[in-house]
Image: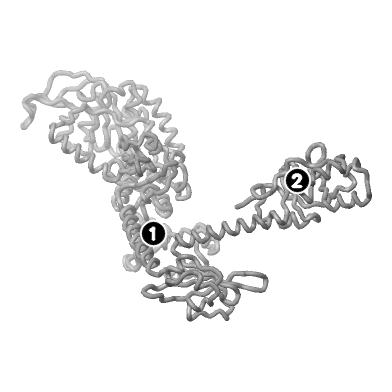
Amino acid sequence: MLHLKNVMEPVKECLFPETSLIQTIKFMKKTKWNTVPVVNQSGKLIGVFTRSSLYNMLLLELDYSTPIENFIKNDIGTTNQHKELNNIEEGISKSEVGTGIIVDDDRKPVGILTPQTAAKNYIKNTRLLKEQLEIILNTSNLGAVMTDESGRIIFVNYVVTKMINQPAHTLISNNLQMIIPNLNLSGDEREATYQLKIRENTYIVRLSRYRKTRENHGYIALFQNTSEIENLAQELKIVNRLKRVLQTIIDHAYDGVVMINEEAKITFYSPQLIELFELENETINGNHVDEVLPQLHLSNVLKTGVADISELMEKKGIKYMIHRIPIYQDEQIIGVVGKIVYRQLHEVRERFRSYESSERGVKNNKTEESKFTFNEIITEDSQMKKLIKSGYKAGKGNTTILIRGESGTGKELFAHALHSSSFCGQGPFITVNCAAIPEHLLESEFFGYEGGAFSGANQKGKIGKFDLANGGTLFLDEIGDMSLPLQAKLLRVLQEREFYRVGGTERIGVNVRIIAATNKPLEDMVSAGTFREDLFYRLNVISVELPPLNRRRKDILLLSEFFIEKLNKQNGTSILGWEPLVEQVLLEYDWPGNIRELRNVWERAMIFAESGKVKLEDLPDYLLKKVGYDLGFEDSEDEMCDFSLMERAEQFAIQKALVQANGNKSKACKLLGISRSLLYDKLKKYEFEVCE
């Protein structure tokens, strides 16, 4: 766009109020200006002195030494030098002197613009614009014809003359119907489209009206060869098909993909990338990669230009690695592609393990040791936090500890943590499941046996669990299932710190800490005579009661997050979370199997999940039935088979919303995010009782 400073006549000198008449005459003769800016001592414009002012002073026969200050005109139009040429009409129109004074930001005159100067520049720019438009039209292969209000041709470009094989001078002044026979200019339509056959080519003609004056309109006709349009359409169709194919491949590939340009701004990303790193679409495209995904280090490749592969990284237990690949064009790096590989790494790792094991014959002969600490017990429950705090203190000593709680509450995990916090934490941690070993073998498992002690015994003998646990901890799981005779021998070891091997006569001293666990009511067993009272009190020095999961509801989601991460590593899955309805079900269920059941449910759900999030249909059917029953659904087989799993989930959501809203259907609609009419349709479908 052209600005005033490019077309104005520069002002280097100005008049002052004290300038004399003779000096003014000489100045105007030299500059040939009819209007001269007048400034103050600071150089700021205060008015103009015109040729008519000069005539007035001469007619009054004033002395040539008279200053011009009383003949200065103050009512003038000014325009800033930065304005565009086509925006000066208002400024100049205010001037009574027919000349526009151009000023800078400090109101100091920098130029003048007369009507003659403006007209000359308009003509010059019009010619330039005409030449530019002709170049644009010719290079775009668009034919262009312009007419006056009667339809007579006043302009044709080179493309049109080539199109109809006639020179321009034979077309000028002829009617446009000479080129477009079926043309109708009598209508009021501002635009029209025609199809025109010229020799072997077909053209689309777009006719538009333009305003010549306030009363008259002319026409512009643009000609486009349809073969070019068809070729473009075909190319576009091929490109769109290729794009859909590539997008399908990317959407269903195992890998996440991200692309950045030479400014390190993200220009492309795949859905798997959003899923893995839990991003929002609006935070990705167009943003700097180091702000959104700094862990990928893609911007480094822009500097080095060298492709590389990262070390193994981890996100929520999901191992992944990054291929960083530079993109070159004419030996200039124009971007980087980051390929995130994660879903198949688990399978590759397992196959390598199997291969290395078979090649090297690796066998694991490590001594049993503790696997967990109190720091690895995940909880937000106040009771559990209190037990952990007590466990830290109890673990420091060598006192026997009895851990009680329902099956699956984490008794063995707590025992590991107690051992790890004790002074013998570096020693062995030996586990004996008293319910899993046959009773006739339990004594030999505990104390070992001498060679030939009984039929079928190893001639070299065998050391027992107490020997293995010497200097460490012996964890007796399911202690309530131990027989009475073995209880008596265990009591002796606890009291005397020594024992005899089966078939042996030599006393063997041992330094072992006992941690026992049970899910049975030992006090009732003592009363019934199935558990020795003296052993009970010997074990029950420090007793820890682990609460069931249904009394630790704050931990359900916390443990779920932990299991997702752990099971992703174990099974090679790529689960990042769950849908809201799943969360409601998890919190409503009673979890009779406690943490063990929660883990099993997650393992099953993650295996069956078909996306990055676990959905309601991925949960076990028995769990959904139980929750639905507790919320008031009928549990009959006939009714359950009437609806799909998703429909039953919908039933659950509606029932849950009605319970939370205390039967208020308007509130239930807000909770469900549906209209009142849709709610009534659903209530009717599932045969809920509809009442106001």
Coloured how? one colour
Under mark 2, the amino acid is Thr
The reply to whether dot 2 and dot 1 touch (C-beta < 8 Å) is no
Whole-percent x and y of residue 268? Answer: 40, 49
The answer to which quarter of the image holds residue 653 is bottom left
Camera-side residue of 394 and 235 = 235
Specify the label residue 180 is tagged with.
Answer: none
Q: Secondary structure at mark 2?
A: helix
Which residue is identified by label 2? 31
Q: Is residue 80 above or below residue 218?
A: above
Within 10 Å of disc 1 (Cα), the crowding (few <14, some 14-19, many 20+) is some
Is residue 548 in view from this perspective? Answer: no
Q: Is residue 549 above or below residue 193?
A: above
Under mark 1, the amino acid is Tyr
Camera-side residue of 548 and 611 = 611
Within 10 Å of disc 2 (Cα), the crowding (few <14, some 14-19, many 20+) is few
